Image (cartoon, rainbow, N blue to C red):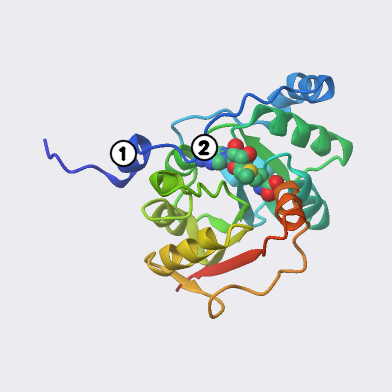
């Protein structure tokens, strides 16, 4: 047998992009989680998803990685009923919160997978099936020894490119400028992706503010946005 590792395996064996926070769930998050997860959470499985069956239509699918408490996610899904959204998050209180939003707004275009996004992409998302990736304020891992945990770098970005359909996009925002610069370079070196702009993207007005963005703004940090497109 060959010693060469498959790309999937490389990602699986790599360090994780997150450390599970101990954050306690509020009673309402717990109630939403217990009552709604079977309806709107798709369990992690080593089997590709069929988006048409899940959403019941052929609309484009946008995947959000690390939606946190999901406030921006819910607003975007409400404003775009003709786009399907799949939110991926490992933080259970955030999953509970987004589940309560799905019910409150009767969202028909949103599902959640509570699992490591890198594994979800490699095992559950068919190649060339995703119209866009939203990655808002990913953990910046500022210490050099932790840079390997950053999500927006190869080979992780190769996997994003592989899952995008032609013309699909990766849209990232960060309040940590050194991570913005780092991601700009990594995405620029990712085969199949092309920067839509020169350098950072202009602010995309349609994106609602997120919780972590507010923290960055309160600390007077600049917001960097990146927008790359899958080439034909
Ligand atoms: C700094 S928070 C930002 C949350 C939200 N997007 C916002 O802007 O408020 C980053 C989130 O990404 C999640 N995350 C990081 N790596 C992940 C992965 N591989 N799979 C799923 N979620 C991940 C973390 O659990 C965390 O909730």
- Which SS class for mark 2? loop
Q: Which residue is painted at 14% across and 39% down in the image?
A: 3
Q: Which residue is painted at 77% across and 69% down in the image?
A: 205
Depicted 145 relative to depicted 24: above or below: below
Residue 144, image x, y percentages: 41, 49
Under 8 Å from ligand 1: the CB of mark 1? Answer: no
Depicted 14 relative to depicted 82: above or below: above
- From this viewpoint, which residue is outermost toward the right? 104
Residue 132, image x, y percentages: 59, 59
Mark 1 highlights which residue?
A: 9
The residues bearing labels 1 and 2 have C-alpha atoms spaced at a distance of: 18 Å
Residue 168, picture quadrant? bottom right
Residue 210, image x, y percentages: 74, 51
Q: In this view, does 116 lie to the left or right of 148?
A: right
Mark 2 highlights which residue?
A: 18
Q: Is residue 165 left or right of residue 134?
A: left
Does the image show residue 66? no
Q: Is residue 77 left or right of residue 54?
A: right
Under 8 Å from ligand 1: the CB of mark 2? Answer: yes
Q: Which residue is painted at 54% across and 50% down in the image?
A: 140
Residues packed near mark 1 inside 10 Å, few (<14), some (14 to 19) or many (20 plus): few
Of residues 27 and 168, the one nearer the viewer is 27
Query: Which quarter of the figure is the C terminus placed in?
Result: bottom left
């Amino acid at each position: 047998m060959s010693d060469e590792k498959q790309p999937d395996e490389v990602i699986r064996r790599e360090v994780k992009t997150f450390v599970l926070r101990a954050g306690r769930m509020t009673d309402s998050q717990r109630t939403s989680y217990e009552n709604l997860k079977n309806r709107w959470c798709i369990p992690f499985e080593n089997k590709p998803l069929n988006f048409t069956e899940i959403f019941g239509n052929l609309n484009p699918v946008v995947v959000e990685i690390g939606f946190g408490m999901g406030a921006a996610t819910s607003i975007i899904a409400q404003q775009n009923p003709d786009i399907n959204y799949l939110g991926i998050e490992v933080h259970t209180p955030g999953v509970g919160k987004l589940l309560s939003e799905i019910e409150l707004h009767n969202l028909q275009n949103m599902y959640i997978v509570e699992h490591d996004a890198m594994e979800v992409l490699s095992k559950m998302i068919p190649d060339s099936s995703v119209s866009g990736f939203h990655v808002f304020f990913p953990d910046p891992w500022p210490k050099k020894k932790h840079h390997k945990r950053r999500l927006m770098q190869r080979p992780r970005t190769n996997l994003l490119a592989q899952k995008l359909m032609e013309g699909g996009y990766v849209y990232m925002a960060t309040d940590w400028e050194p991570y913005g610069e780092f991601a700009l370079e990594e995405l620029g070196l990712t085969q199949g992706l092309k920067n839509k702009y020169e350098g950072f993207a202009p602010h995309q007005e349609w994106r609602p503010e997120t919780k972590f963005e507010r923290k960055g703004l309160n600390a007077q940090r600049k917001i960097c946005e990146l927008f790359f497109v899958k080439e034909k």
